[in-house]
Amino acid sequence: MKKIYLILTALILAIKIQAQTLNIVTNGVTYQFPASQAGEMSYAEGSTLSVMGKTFTISEITKMYVDASTVTNNQVNIVYDGASANVFVAGNIAQYVNATINGAHLSISQSNTTDIDDNEINYTLIGSSSDGSLTLDGSYKCTVSLAGLTLTNPNGAAITINNKKRIQFSVKKETENTLTDGTNGSQKACIYSKGQLQLQGNGTLNITGNTAHAIKSGDYIAVKNLTLNIFSAVKDGISCNKYFQMKSGNVTIKSVGDDGIQADIESDDDATTETEGHEDENSGNLYVEGGTLSITVPTTAAGGKCLKAAGLVRIDGGTHSLTAGGKVDTSDSSDPSYTAAIKGSNVMINNGTIDIKVTGAAGRGISADNTITTNGGTLTITNSGTPTTISSDVKGAKGLKALNIALNAGDITINMSGNASKAIRCGDGTQTSSGGRGGMGGSTKWTNVTGTYTQGLTDGSGPTLTINQTGSAYSSSSAKAIKAICAVTIYGGQTEIYTKSSGAEGLESKTSIDIQGGKHYFQCYDDCLNSAGKISFNGGVTVCYSNGNDAVDSNAGTTGAITIGDGVAFAYTTKGSPEEGFDCDNNSYIQITGTGIGISAGGSQGGGGGGPWGGNSSGNTISNAKQGYAFVTSSISYSKGRYYTLADASGNNLVTYSFEAACSSNLALFTATGMTKNSSYNVKYNTTEPTDATTAWHGLYLGSSHKGTSSVTSFTAK
Amino acid sequence: MKRILFTLMITFGALHAQAYDYPYLVFVNSDGNTTVLSVETLTFIISNGKLVAQNNDGTQSFSLSNLNKMYFTKDADLTGISTTESTDEAVEVYTTGGLSIGKFENEKTAKASLKSGLYILKSNTRTYKIAVK
């Protein structure tokens, strides 16, 4: 019996009190008034019925009934069903919502200017139609939710939101939604919003833009959580004004006719920089804070960019795959546009993993009008873009291209294979002359130079930068790893640069190169370091190995062209004369201003040291050297697999070095920490690699007690 | 025991269907007269200047030009209707859905003829509700 009472009690508790709802159907729209809210419903003169502030013309009421429908305040439910659609409007917002239906094409206007019952109106769309659409008008924010919608409008946009306020566009969890617009229409996008568009939710949204963009907003667009697949767009995948912000989610964009995501500045408003909380921001910035971007710009996209911003492109996190395969846009012959993975006025990478592939002609990995900055993250650029000729000017592909480049931190790998390509290209100026002397390196002069190139920070920290340049020269343009018109300052970090072809210099600056810290290795077919100005080793450890040209080549033509300060430089070439380890046209131009290490090995210009073009031993004198040095012009045959130690007369190790390949030297500079004038030094080798070095870097061993056993050469320091 | 449980479930299954929070819709004419309809299966047809209500109790027609207002209510203690002591006045009995059941000599006679439930009684002087147990 007790059990019966228990069951009875449970049954009583399970009794659900049904709510009553008055449904009034007019013009195909069902307005739903809960009995608990309806209050007094007034008739007037037999012609109108007013319920909760909504006045119906009785003659237009096609159906009225009471049922047990559950009504959620502020809710408009839209159900697409083939050639028709049904709209259900909650009673508390009925007076503010006016909907008209033409087949499955809906036009809804909302007249509220504030929250209703402390909330905004939420439109939820479900169902399917191959000939339907939704147009929203109003002057207050609202939410549009997709909860399983397949909607195609063959004659226009699928969804148009003319409300110039914030629109939350929520894609509901575990639902897949597909929107397609018509071809050759006048619409701006498959989804168009005049106001701010916040794309969110945990569902999936698939979009095809058959006339213009897939998604377009006249204001900012923010993305959070959702999975967004843009299958194709005649123009941009996503286009917005003011700024774009991706917080999280998965966005895949393919087959665009222009850019993957573009953020522009709203021309009707004053431009701003980034603002706190993005309040009233009109920066044209593009922020990627997290999530996953997978964007492919196809070959048909002229000048297409994966990410393009009129302002800053900043990546703070996430995992992203960007493929720029567009063709060159020559519609403006004076300003051709090249495909790029990222293009902005400025580009800043603070964190995240970014995998960039560039296949389009003369394409860019990252391009900025002003500055590219890396403060962290992992950036990999693989660029196979071929060169193209615009108005007789060869344009090669670029990994990074900007006026200013500051690689402060991060793990950066750039693989270039296109002919005439540059892994990094920065600075600008006026090219006033060109020429050069054969093996002496180019002597193109630049004036009015602007821009800067820096690697690392003054505390010695810096990025890990790896460049593999396998491209060759094309027409008059050489492939290069780094080409800077401006001055280059390297404060720290770790660099490895490899090139394979004639003219493919490792680091070329038309102004100057100053290495102040870090560890750097260049293995280049052409010059490892080349500058029209001075090259200084004021800190850090640099190893330069060229197998086709000079290791270090300064064309400054003046005292201090190559300076050994407090840094370490090991420079050798296996090419043989006239290519040198340190080439500055006159050995007397070399300055020793610190207590670093300078070891060079290679051929000599004219077969001997000194002279502007060799042959004058008097040139082998360095004025005001801060420590001892010597130019050794006797022939030294260095072999791979041997470890050569420069030691003083007491056998104290000053430095140990080895070679990647056999190197025949007839001009070698020796200067090392502790060397003094008129003291004797020797070089001996053995075949055992030092294991106690405090620094070991590509054949250079510092702080080791390694001793050679077989004599190579000896000299008295100047 | 099984039979008891089965009976209980049937009973409460029926209860479930009948448990409305606002079971009545009241119509008020411009002359103050009211009509109370049960909302269960209540639908309306608008035709020729009339609002025709249909539910399980039957059909009730209202002249739109004479309708003043309508409202939902939780019980039949409605405005214009009161529970009072029985009198000897002749009454006409309606269901709460507005369906006329018949005319009786007085309330006492009516009660004797009615099944258990709520009814609306209308005399020459007033309209009121009774509960027959």
Image: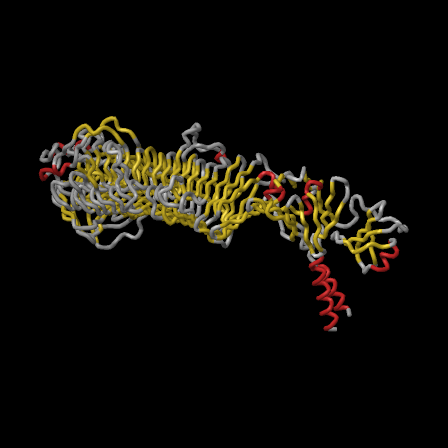
| Residue, far right | B88
User: Residue A690, how many percent across, how many down?
Assistant: 27, 52
Q: Is residue A461 among the parts visible in the rendering?
A: no
Quadrant holding the N terminus of chain A: bottom right
Q: Nearer the viewer, residue A689 or A355?
A: A355
User: Residue A612, how many percent across, how many down?
Assistant: 12, 32
Q: How is the image coloured?
A: secondary structure
Quadrant holding the C terminus of chain A: top left
User: Residue A138, how many percent across, how many down?
Assistant: 52, 36
Image quadrant assignment for residue A76 = top right
| Residue, far front | B48
User: Residue B71, how many percent across, how many down?
Assistant: 71, 45
| Residue, far top | A448
Q: Nearer the viewer, residue A99 or A10?
A: A99
Image quadrant assignment for residue B27 = top right
Residue at the image point whose x is 88% and y is 50% from the top: B89
Q: Nearer the viewer, residue A401 or A378?
A: A401
Left or right: where A481 falls relative to A317? left
Q: Is residue A583 among the parts visible in the rendering?
A: yes
Left or right: where A645 falls relative to A355? left
Image quadrant assignment for residue A10 = bottom right
Q: How many marks?
A: 0
